[in-house]
Image (cartoon, rainbow, N blue to C red):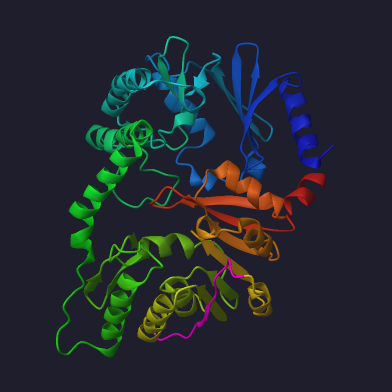
Amino acid sequence: MDVKENYWKKCLLLLGLEDATLLSQSIYDFSRRVYVKEDLLYKILLPKYDSTGALRNQSLADEFTIVEKYSGMNGIPKSIEYRKIEDIEVAIYKYIPFKSLDQVQLGLFQLCNILFHLLPILYKLSLQGVCHNDIMPDNILVSKDGMPFLIDFDQAKLLSPREALIRNMFGTGICILTMAEHRSLFIKIKNQLKKYMPPHIRQALHQLRNDLLMRPKRRLPKLPENASPQLKNILEAWKLAQLSPANAPGNMVSYYSFDFEGHHFPGERPWLDRWFVLSRLTAFRGKRILELGCNLGMLSCFLLKETEAAAALAVDYDDTIITAAHKVASALGVSPVYMKINFDDPDNWEKELINFKPDIVFALNVLNWVNDKKRFMSFLGRFQEVIVEGHDDIAEETKRLRDIGFDRIKLIAFSERNRPIISCLKESEITHEISS
């Protein structure tokens, strides 16, 4: 038996739950599971091995306290008891065999009915200053008569009633660096209703949004005559980035937005918000960095400039964006190496990149644009430490990474586009800790 499973078996025996049914388990944190026995649900945490607690706004005990306070309210699970036995934490709730929203086949009328009944639940919570922060289909249970229940308050925050109401209904409207804090009811309504729209309607609405919102974001600043050479380089880089097919072809918009020497250079994704997350992932000092799909090369430049990384190799497929990246590097006073590579090219591009001998490999928002995904993932599997930003849900991304040999997979955050940012390592020490 796997040592992890053996450890869980001992814990369940201690709790008297050896015959309980496993309902769910965290796919990236083996210390968290949910079991069912008779009519009770047991949410169990092994704190000693918890690897995602820092990404949660509430501890298991605090989450139970929130649910307990409102468990008499319609649409909130009934709390039973919180226990701490040795190094095991357990929150116990009344179990009712509902299905989550993402498991139920619904017509448009049924969906609207469920979302309509969620409104008073969130409104009442908001009046008490409770912001759920994680309104996802798997956190909304649906009874046989179509009534919704809201579960999983581990991302909840206690705010003023006004702020809680705004966040619950509309989200924060900014880039949040914890686990998808911007998930709100109206964002969920929009995403669900999009499924029922004909493709041509969705396309027309998307184009209208671009026309109304994107055009002002494309305007580059007008520099003064005495602008520094560095500032002029940034302007030239952004002009090239707007023309490059490496990002939103035809939309005339750079991938990143960036403030430099008092001027704002517009783009789709705020660079400093992204840097705030990426710079805290691991120790970079003295490390060799390989950045796949570098675009403007901002990550390589900042790692060299701010963290004393030893070297950086930045890769993209488009000549224009690489020229722009060189200008960014010049403006920031660093010298990453740039290489033009198409990951679908039949040539052996892997050899050149492996010869660089990177300590850390970044593949942010790359796989979705590669045709030969198996080849690209096999390449990532050659390294000891990889950081990826995926397009798919965390379960699929985790399976994909385990299949290429990574055994320490940790969700770091969700990007402002609601995509998982995942740290992947090999040769886990967890197994040795458990067996000892």
Find the magenta span and give its range: 333-345
Q: Say whether residue 309 is visible.
A: no
User: Which of the two residues, 99 or 16, is positioned nearer the viewer here?
Assistant: 99
Please check the rendered image and state whether residue 203 is part of the magenta-colored stretch, yes or no.
no
Name the side, left or right, on which 191 lies relative to 282: left
Residue at (29%, 38%) from the top-left corner? 167
Please check the rendered image and state whether residue 342 is part of the magenta-colored stretch, yes or no.
yes
Q: Is residue 433 above or below residue 378?
A: above
Q: Indicate the position of residue 119 as horizontal and vertical percent values.
A: 29, 23
* Helix, strand or loop for the magenta stretch, by majority: loop
User: Which of the two residues, 313 or 80, is positioned nearer the viewer here?
Assistant: 313
Name the side, left or right, on which 87 lies relative to 188: right
- In the image, farthest residue toward the right: 1
Residue at (32%, 72%) from the top-left corner? 243
Figure label count: 0
Q: Is residue 78 above or below residue 187?
A: above
Residue at (27%, 24%) from the top-left corner? 123
User: Which of the two residues, 231 or 92, is positioned nearer the viewer here?
Assistant: 231
Task: Work out which quarter of the rendered image holds the N terminus and state it.
Answer: top right
In which image quadrant can residue 204 be found? top left
Q: Is residue 108 above or below residue 168?
A: above
Q: Indicate the position of residue 113 as horizontal and vertical percent values.
A: 33, 17
Residue at (36%, 36%) from the top-left corner? 191
